[in-house]
Every structure is written in structure tokens, then in C-alpha cells.
């Protein structure tokens, strides 16, 4: 989640610096032009973690409108996420699926990042036909079904087109 916050901030032109600090002992991310974001895991709710926003903003209202079916909300400042355990079988299955996507279906790159039990995976394809073939692969479908019952409480798949890409080396 930390990596997602930082990488998203880097893509927004109006944000030229993000400060990572602790507020109330919790990781917090502050920008000059924006609202503080805070993340936390609490011992009393070990199966979830939360992202907090300033309650004086309309961010949670906006997220509720856009993502009401994807996220769980508490009040006007918190989004909660559920944690599922990713085990060694998950790691070997994910590795095999990446290798299969690249070797059999022409995926040009498959990268992922994991923080705790949260994974974000991005794959790059030349054509939508390759994506459709990959989606219908029997091994892939079997792995997805195991994932739905064992590893994921929820997940989202987005097929997007890169319009522009910016890189900065510091």
C-alpha cells in the first residue's frame, strides 16, 4: 500500500514532493497540495488494515461513489481492507502463471509488488487477443478459482491502455 501511495503521487503533476512521516505512530503521507493519507493495522482487528483520510475532505464520499462495491468504508474518513494469508503454494502458483503468460501467450512483461499480504501485479501485452487467450487458459482459470476460495477476499482486474508514461531518475 505504501508503494502504491508513493507511485501514484509521482504520477500526479501537482505533487512534486511527498513527505513520509509518522502520525500517532502510524505511517502517514503528506503533500503540499493535498490531503494527508495515513495507514494502519491494529492488533484488535488483525485481519484488516485501514487507510485514513482527513474527515473534512470529500475524499471518502468520492471513493464511496466510485468504488462502493470494491471497498469497505467506516464513517467519513476510513477505508478498510481485509488480509488473506499468502502462502508458499500461492508464490509457486503465481510464478508458474507468470511464466505461462510470457512463454505461451506472449505477455511481454509481468511485474508485481507485494507488501504484507497485498499484491499488485501488472502485465503488458501487445494485443487484446493475447489477453483473451490468456484469460481462457484452463490452468489460469483453475489458479483463479483457487485464488478466489483460498487467497483473495476480493480482487480487481483492469485492462488499461498506456496513453503516456513518465520516468524520472533521481
Image: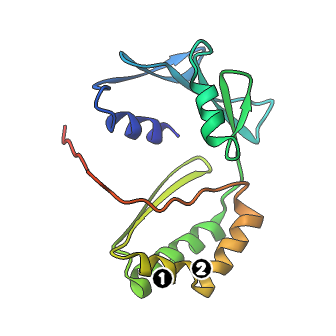
Q: Which residue is mark 1?
A: 100
Query: Residue 49: horizontal and vertical position, in percent?
Result: 68, 36
Residue that protrudes farthest toward the front in the picture: 65
Dot 2 or dot 1, earlier in sequence:
1
Regarding mark 1 in the picture, which secondary structure is present there?
A: helix
Q: Which residue is mark 2?
A: 140
17 or 62, nearer to the observer:
62
The structure residue drawn at horizontal position 66% and vertical position 58%, both measured from the top left corner, is 86
Vertical side of 115 occupied by 110: above or below:
below
Report which quarter residue 92 is drawn in.
Answer: bottom right
137 or 47, nearer to the observer:
137
Quadrant where the C terminus sits is top left
* Residues at marks 2 and 1, CA–CA distance in whole angstroms: 9 Å
How many other residues sit within 10 Å of disc 2, few (<14), some (14-19) or many (≥20)? some
Report which quarter residue 153 is drawn in.
Answer: bottom right
In this rendering, position of residue 31 left or right of residue 163: right
| For the residues bearing labels 2 and 1, Cβ distance under 8 angstroms | yes
Amino acid at each position: 500500500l505504501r508503494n502504491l501511495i508513493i507511485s501514484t503521487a509521482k504520477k500526479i503533476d501537482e505533487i512534486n514532493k511527498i513527505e513520509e512521516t509518522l502520525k500517532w505512530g502510524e505511517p502517514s503521507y503528506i503533500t503540499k497540495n493535498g490531503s494527508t493519507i495515513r495507514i494502519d493495522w491494529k492488533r484488535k482487528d488483525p485481519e484488516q488494515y485501514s487507510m485514513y483520510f482527513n474527515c473534512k475532505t470529500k475524499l471518502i464520499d468520492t471513493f464511496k461513489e466510485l468504488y462502493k462495491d470494491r471497498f469497505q468504508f467506516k464513517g467519513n474518513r476510513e477505508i478498510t481492507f481485509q488480509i488473506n494469508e499468502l502462502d508458499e503454494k500461492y508464490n509457486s502458483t503465481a510464478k508458474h502463471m507468470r511464466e505461462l503468460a510470457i512463454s505461451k501467450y506472449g505477455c511481454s512483461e509481468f511485474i508485481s509488488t507485494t507488501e504484507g499480504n497485498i499484491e499488485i501485479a501488472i502485465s503488458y501485452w501487445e494485443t487484446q487477443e493475447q489477453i483473451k487467450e490468456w484469460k481462457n487458459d484452463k490452468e489460469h482459470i483453475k489458479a483463479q478459482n483457487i485464488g478466489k476460495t483460498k487467497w483473495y477476499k476480493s480482487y480487481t482486474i483492469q485492462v488499461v491502455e498506456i496513453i503516456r508514461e513518465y520516468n524520472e531518475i533521481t
